Image (tube, rainbow, N blue to C red):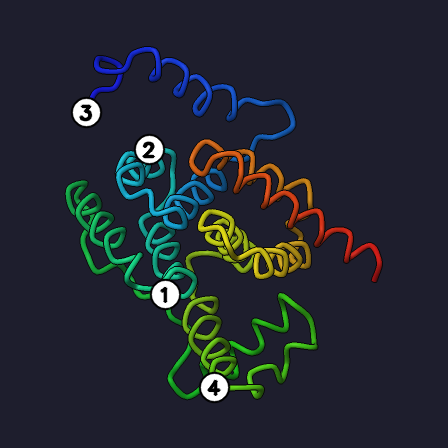
């Protein structure tokens, strides 16, 4: 649908806001790779499949690699569930194939079934601190979290740990209702160098895709995480 023809006034204002005003706001910009990673993760989080199909070609044209795109989608499963992620994986495969990308892509896994728990727990420690070293022992869900979420996905190549925490922040902010986890992951981002100002820039660049309420909630979580760090 060409909204410039069917809804010209809306198209004029939205395109100006999302692709000019927001992108070029002084002090709130991100490099192209980071911005597109954040937007893709945000669209997964808010279930914006139609907008994802518009955004993905823009992201690829801007330099995002197919591996980076796939890594965002794979990691989303642990935060959104396969029921919400499958349409995005299908759409990405269709778009990549149409652009001549041969699938499957080169493997990025660095763990085995034997060491995924150990490596996942170590990744949790790197992000959240030594208090997470034995967290996997608390319950089977905590064990799954360490082995599956962190051991299967965070340990993969294609994205570094700071990028992975940033996209997790976007998944949580975009779906809403996850403020305790969002605050925790805002703190995890800060531990990896993604500071308060950076996270606010991320929220700012994603605001056109999730609206003001969830964006303001995300900023409140960032501020809470920053205040907690200052007290410690």
State how many labels appear: 4
The extreme right residue here reads 231
Q: Residue at x 52, y 42 (%)?
A: 214
Q: In this image, 8 relative to 28: left or right? A: left
Q: Report the mark closest to the observer, 2 or 3.
A: 3
| Tag 1 near tag 4, CB within 8 Å | no
- Sequence-wise first label, 2 or 3: 3
Residue under pointer 1: 108
| Tag 4 near tag 3, CB within 8 Å | no
Q: CA distance from mark 1 to mark 3?
A: 37 Å
Q: CA distance from mark 4 to mark 3?
A: 47 Å
Q: In this image, 161 relative to 134: left or right? A: left
Which element is circle 4 on?
A: helix
Which quadrant would the N terminus be assigned to in this image? top left
Residue under pointer 4: 140
Q: CA distance from mark 2 to mark 1?
A: 24 Å
* x and y, in percent, of residue 40 in the image: 39, 44
Which element is circle 1 on?
A: loop
Q: CA distance from mark 1 to mark 4?
A: 26 Å
- Sequence-wise first label, 1 or 3: 3
Q: CA distance from mark 4 to mark 2?
A: 41 Å
Pick the residue in front: 90 or 179: 179
- Sequence-wise first label, 1 or 4: 1
Q: Residue at x 53, y 34 (%)?
A: 212
Quick one: label 2, few (<14), some, or many (20+) residues within 10 Å? few
Residue under pointer 2: 58
Q: Residue at x 24, y 48 (%)?
A: 92
Q: Report the mark closest to the observer, 4 or 2.
A: 4
Which element is circle 3 on?
A: loop
- Sequence-wise first label, 2 or 1: 2
* x and y, in percent, of residue 25 in the image: 58, 23
Q: CA distance from mark 2 to mark 3?
A: 17 Å
């Amino acid at each position: 649908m060409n909204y410039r023809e069917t809804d010209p006034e809306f198209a004029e204002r939205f395109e100006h806001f999302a692709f000019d005003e927001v992108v070029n706001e002084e002090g709130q910009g991100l490099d192209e790779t980071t911005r597109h990673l954040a937007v893709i993760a945000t669209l997964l989080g808010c279930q914006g499949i139609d907008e994802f199909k518009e955004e993905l070609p823009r992201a690829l044209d801007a330099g995002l690699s197919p591996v980076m795109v796939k890594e965002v989608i794979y990691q989303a499963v642990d935060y959104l569930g396969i029921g919400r992620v499958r349409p995005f994986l299908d759409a990405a495969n269709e778009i990549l194939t149409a652009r001549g990308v041969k699938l499957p892509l080169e493997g990025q896994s660095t763990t085995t079934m034997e060491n995924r728990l150990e490596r996942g727990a170590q990744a949790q420690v790197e992000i959240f601190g030594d208090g997470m070293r034995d967290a996997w022992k608390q319950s089977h869900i905590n064990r799954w979290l360490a082995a599956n979420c962190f051991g299967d996905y965070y340990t993969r190549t294609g994205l570094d740990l700071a990028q992975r925490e940033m996209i997790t922040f976007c998944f949580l902010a975009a779906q809403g209702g996850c403020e305790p986890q969002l605050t925790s992951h805002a703190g995890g981002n800060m531990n990896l160098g993604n500071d308060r100002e950076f996270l606010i820039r991320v929220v700012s660049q994603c605001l056109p895709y999730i609206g003001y309420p969830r964006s303001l909630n995300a900023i409140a979580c960032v501020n809470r995480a920053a205040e907690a760090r200052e007290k410690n």
